Amino acid sequence: MKIAIVGGGPGGLYFAALMKQLDPAHDVTIWERDASDVTFGFGVVFSDETLGGIENADPEFADAMARRFARWTDIDIHYRGESHTVGGQGFAAMSRKELLGLLQQRCRDLGVVVHFSTPAPAVDVLRESHDLVVGADGVNSLVRRSSDVFRSTVDPRRNKYMWLGTDLVFEAFQFFIKDTPWGTMQVHGYPYSDSGSTFIVEMHEDVWRRAGFDTGEEFAPGASDERAVERVRELFAEELAGHQVFANNSKWLSFTTVRNERWHDGNLVLVGDAAHTAHFSIGSGTKLAMEDSLALAACLHEHRDVETALTAYETERRPVVESTQRAAQASLEWFENIGMYADQEPTRFCFNLLTRSRRITYDNLRTRDSEFADRVDAAFAASQGLETTAPAMFQPFRLGQLELKNRVIVSAMDMYSAVDGVPGDFHLVHLGSKAMGGAGLVMTEMVCVSPEGRITPGCTGLWTDEQRDSWARIVSFAHERSTARIGLQLGHSGRKGSTRLMWEGMDEPLPEGNWDVVGPSPLPYGPGNAVPGEVDRERITAEFVAAARRGAEAGFDLLELHCAHGYLLSSFLSPIANQRTDEYGGTLTNRLRFPLEVFDAVRAVWPAERPMIVRISATDWVDGGNTEHDAVEIARAFIAHGADAIDVSTGQVTSDERPAYGRSYQTPFADRIRHEVTGAAVIAVGAIASYDDVNSILLAGRADLCALGRTHLYDPHWTLHAAAEQDFRAEWPVQYRAGSRKPPSARTDAVRPRLSLLRADPPDRNVHLRWTPRREHSVLG
């Protein structure tokens, strides 16, 4: 195979070496526009997981790397005059210059042709003359820009950073968090040899400008910003302890996140930063590039057809990379917003930093360093005024005047199973089982204030006394048979009403019997939905008030006003649905007007001793819609009017939304509101799937309570089971106490492994190269 590689960085060099090892007959040529001794940065980091793959693929090269490694097992975090150490890590780093030297020598030994200081021929020319063209030319890839098939997005971020080196040899990975008169600055530092360490300085662009780093000067290619380097020496003199800082083409940069919908086009393929980037705070782009090269070489060796091989490569690598990018994005945004946490107690801050990407959790850290985990538990209990430590999710919480036995909420979930708005036996069993399942608070589905306010014909309501009395039966069961509290979610469907049951076609209009829908503007929710009519604000406010009175009479402990998910009050808040030009549209203040009028009217009739909370969509997930910044102001407004908590969800305001799904993907919005707005509790929701996630969110201070929906559908007794898993003595219903201990494990003495199948066959390169990394749980991210 004749192979052209554009870019002589670690990814391109490593791929070339692997292909020549697999088959010396491959004709492999690399073009690198810089000289062989030109490199940017200082050290590169590898995890034990990545090194295992390299060792399997090329033991000789892996051994040469290992002889040059600096290794460490600790993370040190310096914050507000305190230093915290977290142990149990497994990382190695080496000089980037040495790594390139090793790879260059490996390519020479194997017969790879490398043209340094030479721009590559045009991509079209290479494609015609080669069987395969590999774009390994980095974040500013010319290869990527040569094809529209990749459908690239490039996202420059708000922080500024500078990659420096120092002759101070750190003994562990270092995070220096420094309060300055201009704002928070941070240093990411780690050793890469016995003579030096990487020293990355990072700060928000606003801090960077206030500190005077924005000189407006342009620097020649390869030149360092010496003025800024000298300023860094002065600012971090204490951290450097008399040691030097070195530049290497060092200047202020903004990290750019690169994504591509496709990574290959015919015989053209991307690897490393040309295909994807991940913020340096969770590890090394070099690591990802070399893993790409490993996977690509393996797929090409297994599949003789290039298109089949490239499809297999992308299929294998994309899930791993996208998972890494999600974690990197969370970490990147955390550091962009680090100023929000400036007042956190040091132990909680350290835990928050370590778990910022949502890959690292409380349990991960306890496995690595149980003493640190104990300090985190103790700090959390102290911050809550509690005398004893316990899993954070089982610490009690006071919401207004309502005492909750723990911090787990069964989230509101529409069941579409009522008749004429009346909840029946299904709802009794559904909510009753959740109340007996151990959660501190159980929420109803959205209970509609009128027949026209229903989403579907199967939605429950509170516009009649019959409905009230049926709800009272459910509330009484929860109170008599459990220690859970039960909350009422009250709402109006707005322009999302008059649709089929979820399992018959979510958000699709009824085939017959439709009712008129209303909204702030005559804009349908989606292409097939009805155009909403004008809102009679006085009538609808009165319907909310009447429903709230019935809810109080039914005995609900709490009321949540539903201002999320594109329903009526949510649609007034969103500029996507609300395009009015009167006092109820336009500015956010005006868009808040009607939801606040409803809130005030309901609060006036809802018993003062019972809390009232609000669910909001913190982002519309679409250009032109509400953002997290709007959510902060929306939350602030409702709290000023007396809301006891803000339940932070997102989206479902428009069918054009593009959510960034992922683990606990909505939690950062709750986190922002909790740290920027005071006076109320904050509830996190969305893809929170484990008790470890719940504990991690609470311990980091990202929310005060966590609401889980699908998790409780899967297991109605999830909270009780979580208590058993954590050896916490939760209060079980007396009828179930015989099952309150985890059953013993099944017998294993009859399991006899077939050793002949477990033994490894004599190694061959194909088996070695088919290494797929597991999800890594690095404390770096």
Image (spheres, grey):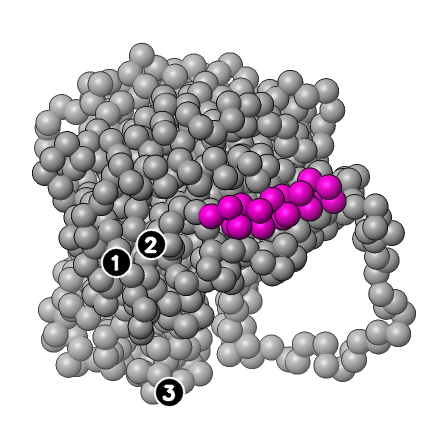
Q: Residue sitting at 65 percent across and 57 percent down?
A: 429
The relative height of residue 199 versus residue 522 in the rendered view (above or below) is above
Of all residues shown, which one is farthest toward the front?
A: 465
**Residue at 35% over, 83% down:** 308
Disc marking residue 95: none
Q: Is residue 431 left or right of residue 687?
A: right
Mark 1–mark 2 CB contact (< 8 Å): yes
Q: Is mark 3 on a helix, strand or loop?
A: loop
Relative image position of residue 497 (x, y in whole percent): 32, 57
Residue at horizontal 37%, vertical 87%? 304
Q: Is residue 44 left or right of residue 439?
A: left
Question: Of residues 266 and 206, which is closer to you in this image?
Answer: 206
CA–CA distance in space, label 2 to label 3: 62 Å
SS class of the residue under badge 1? loop
Q: Give whichever of discs 2 and 3 has the lower sequence position.
A: 3
Most prominent secondary structure in the magenta stretch? helix
Residue 264 lies in the magenta stretch: no
Q: Is mark 2 on a helix, strand or loop?
A: helix
| Residue 603 seen | yes
Image disc number at residue 516: 1
Q: How crowded is mark 1: few (under 14 residues within 10 Å), some or many (20 or more)?
A: some
The x, y position of residue 684, in whole percent, is: 48, 40
What type is the residue that disc 3 sits on? Arg
Residue at image point 84% right, 74% down: 751
Instruction: Find disc 2 in the rendering and name its residue.
Output: 452
Task: Write down the residue under mark 3.
Answer: 304
Q: Dot 3, crowdedness within 10 Å: few (<14), some or many (≥20)? A: few
Q: Give the range drawn in magenta.
A: 464-482
In contact (CB < 8 Å): disc 3 and disc 1: no
Seen from the viewer's position, the closer of residues 480 and 229 is 480
